[in-house]
Image (cartoon, helix red, strand yellow):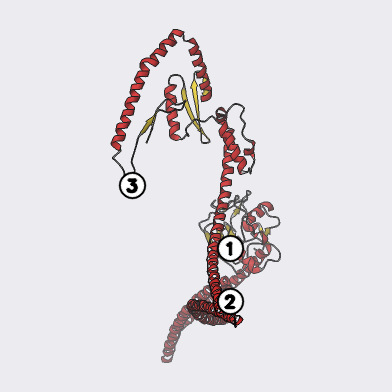
Amino acid sequence: MRNAQDLPPAVPEWLGSRPPHTVALWQLLDFKPGVDEEVQAGVEGALLASGLLYGEVTTGGEIRARNGQLLLTAQGPQALRSVRTLLTPAENAAVDATVVNAVLDRIALEPGHPTWLSPDGSWGNGPLTGCYRPAAARFIGAAARAAARAARLTEIDDLLQLQQRGQERSEHHDVLKDASKALEEHLVRAPRSARLATLRLQAAAARAQIVARRREARALAEEAERMQRAWTARNRSHQEICAALGMPEDIDGLLAVRGYAQQAQAACSNVDHAVETVTSHLDRHRKAWGRLDPVQERRTQAEETAESAWLTWSREAAALAALREALGADPDQVHRRLKEAEAELRRTEDRLRHSRSQIVKLTGLVASAEEKAQVARQKAVDAKAALIQQAQVLHQRLGHPSIAVALAAGTQPPPVLRSPDPAADDVLAAVRQVRAAVQRPDSTADATALMRALSLLERNTAGAYDITVTVEDDLHVVELADATGRRHIADAAADLRERRDRGRGALTQRERTAFHNFVLGGMAEELRQRLKEAEELVKAMNTSLGSITTSHGIGVKIDWRLSDAAGETSPRSKG
C-alpha cells in the first residue's frame, strides 16, 4: 500500500479467483469533478452490492463475474439517464474508453430500466434489488483509493502499536512472574518464625486475592471488549439506518427530528379533527340538499298557484276595465262583449297550452333526431371505410390471373378503384361495371353450390380431365388437366365446344335421323310418363299435407315444376 498498490474490494466466497489479464470495473472508472461525496458513496455502494463493481469488463462491453456468470449483457438497452452523468472512464485505463462508456450507458440512474442504481445506494438488476451505502467511496477514482489506502495504513499503524503494547505488557508480565517466583524461592529458603508465618499467610492471601482480581479484571476486560464490539456494530447499524432514512446521527439531530415528528403528529391530529368537522358539514349539506326537493316542489306548486291566480285576476281586471269603459252603454252589449272576451281568452289559453305541449314534443323530437343523425353520420363513416376497403380488395382480386378468364374480352379494371379515397358513387359505379363484365350464372354462388358444381363437373368430365381446385386469396381457382397440360374452365369449355362441333360435323345424315327418332320417340314418351307420375305424386302429398299445420297455424305445400331457364335441364322442387 505504501507503494500505491490498490486494494481490491472484498468479493463473496462463492466467486473463484480472477483470471490473469482481466480488468475489473472499479479499475476503469472515476467520478466527474463536482460530484458530492455522499453521492459518490451511494453510487459505489450500489455497484458493490449489485456485484458490478468487481465484475470483469470484456472487450465486447459485457460485465462477467469471476465464475463466468453474465451480470450485464452487451445487447441491453441504453438508459435515457445513465450513470455516465456521474462517472467517466479513468485515465490510462486498460480498456478502451468507448467500451467503458457503452457499459455506463446501459446502467440507468433511476428505476424503470433492467439495470439501474440510485445515488442513495439502492440498485436493481432484473428482478434483484437492494441497497447499500458505505461511509465514503473507496474504490472508484484514484483520489478515493489513495484516501482508502491512507486510512488503511493508519489502521495498520494503530494495530501495530496495539500489538507492540501487548507484547510489552506480556514481557512485563513475564518479569513480574519471574520476580514472584524468585520471591517464593527466597521465602522458602528464608528462616521460619511466627511473624514470618503470619506474613506468609498474608502474602498467600494477597496472591490469591491478586489472582482473583486478575481473573475478575480479565473477565471484565473481555466483557468490556464484547460490549465495545456490540456497541460498534450497533453504532454502525445506527449510522447505516440514519443514512438510509436521511436522518442525522447525533443526539441533538435525532432529538430535533423527534420534535418535528411530534409536531407532525399534532398537525395530523388537527387535520383529523378538521376532516371530522368537514365530514359533519358535508352530512349537513347532504341533509339540506335532501330537503331541497320538497321545498322546490312546494315552490313550483306555489308558482303555479300564483300564475293561476294571476290569470284569474287578469281576467277579472279585464272584465272590470271593460265594464269601466262601457259604463253608461247598453248592458246587453256590455255582457255580449264580456262573453266574447272570455271566449277569446279561453281560446288563447287553449292555444297557449297546445303550443307549450308542441314545444315539449318538438324538443324531444329534435334531441332524438340529433342522436339519430349522429349515429347515421358514424354509420356513414364506417360504411365508407368498409366500402373503400372492399374496393381495394376488389381491385387486388381483379388483378388475379384467374379472374381474367371470367371477364369479357377487352375488359379492364375500373380506374377509380386505384384511388386511395374514392367517392361512394364512383365505387358503386365501378362495382356495377365489374359485375356487368363478369360472366355470372343465374343463381348466387355459395359453398354448397360450389360443391354441387364441382361434383357435376367431375361426373361430366370423368375420363377426359382431372380437376384441380386451389384457394388463393379467398378465390377458388378450378383448373382442368389432361395430357396436354392444365387449363382454366373457360379454355377447357372452348376446347370441348370445338370437339363437339367437329363431332357434329362428322355425323352422317342417317346417324342424325336415327338419333333424332330415338330421342324424340321412346325417350320423349318415357320422360312424359315420368313427369306425369311426378305431378300426381306432388298432388297426393299436398292433399295429405293440407290438414297438417304447426302450432302457429303455418301449413306446408309442395310446388314442383320444370325450370324455364335455357341453361338448366333439371327440375326444381320448392316448398
- Check disc 3 and report the residue beneath it: 552
**Residue at the spot 62% in from the left edge and 31% down from the top edge:** 412
Marks 3 & 2, CB-CB < 8 Å contact: no
Across and down, in percent, residue 442 comes to: 48, 31
Q: Mark 1 packing: few (<14 Cα in 10 Å), some, or many (20+)?
A: many
Dot 1 amino acid type: Ala
The mark nearer the N terminus, 1 or 3, is 1
Across and down, in percent, residue 111 comes to: 58, 61
Is residue 98 among what the camera can see? yes
- Check disc 1 and report the residue beneath it: 46
The mark nearer the N terminus, 2 or 1, is 1
Residue in the foreground of this view, choosing between 422 and 574: 574
Q: Which mark is residue 249?
A: 2
Dot 3 amino acid type: His
Local secondary structure at mark 2:
loop
Is residue 74 found left or right of 444 in the rendered image?
right
**Residue at the spot 48% in from the left edge and 10% down from the top edge:** 506
Cα distance between the residues tagged 2 and 1 = 21 Å
